[in-house]
Amino acid sequence: MKNHHEQPTEQQQGLSRRNFLTTAVVGLTGIAAVGLAGCNARQSEEGNTAAGDTSQLPGTWDGEADVVVCGGGGSGLTAAYAALDAGASVLVLEKGDVVGGTTALAEGAVQAAGTAWQKELTSYQDDNAEKHFLYWMTDAEGLVEEDLVRSMAENAADNLQWMADNFGITFSKVFGCLPTPYLPDDLMADRIHLITDATDATKTGGTVWTTKAEAAVKDKGGEILTGTAVASLIMDGANGVAGVTTSDGKNYKANKGVVLAMAGIEHNEELARKYNPQHYWDLKTQQVVTAATDTGDGIEMGLAAGADVGRFGGCVDLILATWSGTNNTNPEMPAIFVNMRGNRFVREDTTYAFHMRSCFNEAMQEGGWDGCTWMVLDSKMTTMDAQSPWSDAIEGGTQQREDDLASGTLLKADTIEALATAMGVPSANLAFTVQKWNADTTAGNDSLYGRVKQVVPLDTAPYYAYRILHTNIGAIGGLRINDRAAVLNVSGKEIGHLYAAGTNSGGWLGPYYPGSGTCLQGALHWGRTAGASAAS
């Protein structure tokens, strides 16, 4: 891989909302069975303080390897394989009963520019890493580490080829994200690659990656222990990390390095409240559908060892019910978003996490902890042949509409004013908002926010309102790393022999998620980088 400083050595098209939830529930049930061991333990059975007091090492070790990888999701398995490929022995410790983590629940989208698949399957023949870098940097609003983003962009295409060569994977579709209002058109391209089993094109998704990677790690001689929760790091004074202690009191020695690949703070309310208000609100009032094992253990252990944080704040949020803004091949529903005052507040046809950040901000501004936003639609949503979950034209759509109306998730009225009353928003405001929108659609121009997709009027009764539910598939933020994936302390120095990968690391994502495939590229890139760096 390219190393920028040359230092030593979101979405499958056609994935249904129901299938996503079913997969998530099944995956979470299996992963949660092991239980969530506490990660605040600081002492081994021998009494040494693993993360704070660095004066002692265990008298004996229960096992050892050159590289100990904590976490068996996409980034952990990739780190393990990369370390094995570099000639190191590897031990993977996974808290869940099975490997895979949140990667196994993902639709399997990975972003990259300039790949053979992009050239074969799209019209983008001249896309390149520099454009991809500028795309990610622009969406980051200046709140990322430039060298980390450049490293990801410059290595993204090679990472996909490496994945294909080593894990028996190909990419069957390549599509694109939706933009943000300030993103130049020339930085947009179809870069989202759908992971597909190279021997069976019917198998797609993140589970293909983790299943294939697990087999590759084992075939190469790596050892994987599931049902094994890492509780703390064992420090060796100024030398850095010497190994790890598990929740059952066993000590594992890492001769060369430890890789933390234990996901983010998805189900850690304490860290979410401290670092990420949007994610905390989602945990308490909305829904978070990542693996139950994503409890921020690796981040807590890194902090206890003196690590600095990367960039916390923001989420991978979407409207799962409608799949709005998730990729450029889906039609956007004829709908507008309004706040609790009945006013529009965002360009609705932007990439999903961008407009969901706006939904969160509006909910807080107008209603605080109990705030919300609404999607306002008319009866055209009941006749769409795609995208609308409430359409008579799709299987189960009519029943879904009736169920949601009965539960109050969806509201219905014959006039906009009556709909506003049901929503609890000022009727005059909502009526004005819809009239303004309809006038703009007649003129063919969204004069307020510049929307370009589905600029069609809401003028056909009955009218509907959906109270937007945020579905969170990841929190943004982790340990600060450099482009070797080495964990940095608060002084910006490497903590010896400690590396972080995937969303256990931070600094390469900005204040909202820039589009499907970014997190899995981060898991792939930082896993590969961390494994190779630890092995060296």
Image (cartoon, rainbow, N blue to C red):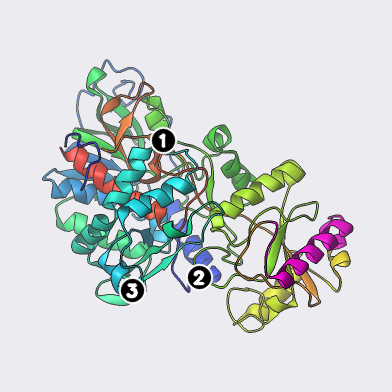
The span from disc 3 to disc 2 (Cα, nearest Å) is 26 Å
Q: Nearer the viewer, mark 3 or mark 2?
A: 3
Q: Residue furthest bottom?
A: 393
Instruction: Point out residue 263 in the picture as x, y percentages from the top left corner.
Output: 40, 45
Which residue is situated farthest in the front direction here? 443
Is 294 positioned to the left or the right of 278 in the image?
Answer: left
Local packing at callout 3 (Cα closer than 10 Å; few below 14, some 14-19, many 20+) is some
Residue 121: which numbered mark, if any?
Answer: 3
Decide: few, some or many residues near mark 2? Use Cα within 10 Å; few <14, some 14-19, many ≥20: few
Residue 430 among magenta residues: yes
Does residue 498 sit above or below 378 in this rendering?
A: above
Amino acid at dot 1:
Ile
Q: Main secondary structure of the magenta part?
A: helix
Q: Pick whichever of labels 1 and 3 is earlier in the sequence.
A: 3
The picture quadrant where one finds residue 131 is bottom left
Residue 152 point in image, percent of width and height: 32, 48
Q: Position of residue 490 (x, y in %)?
A: 39, 23
33 or 479, which lies in front? 479
Marks 1 and 2 sit apart, C-alpha to C-alpha, by 31 Å
- What amino acid type is highlighted by mark number 3? Leu
N-term mark: 3 or 2? 2
Q: What amino acid is found at the position of numbered circle 2 in the picture?
A: Asn
Judging by the rendered image, the residue that carries numbered circle 1 is 299
Question: Which residue is labeled 2 in the image?
Answer: 19
Dot 1 falls on a residue whose secondary structure is helix
| On screen, residue 494 above or below 355 | above
Badge 3 element: helix
Q: Would you say residue 34 is visible in this rendering?
A: no
- 7 part of magenta stretch: no
Magenta segment, which residues? 420-448
Q: CA distance from mark 1 to mark 3?
A: 39 Å
| 11 relative to 441 in the view: left or right | left
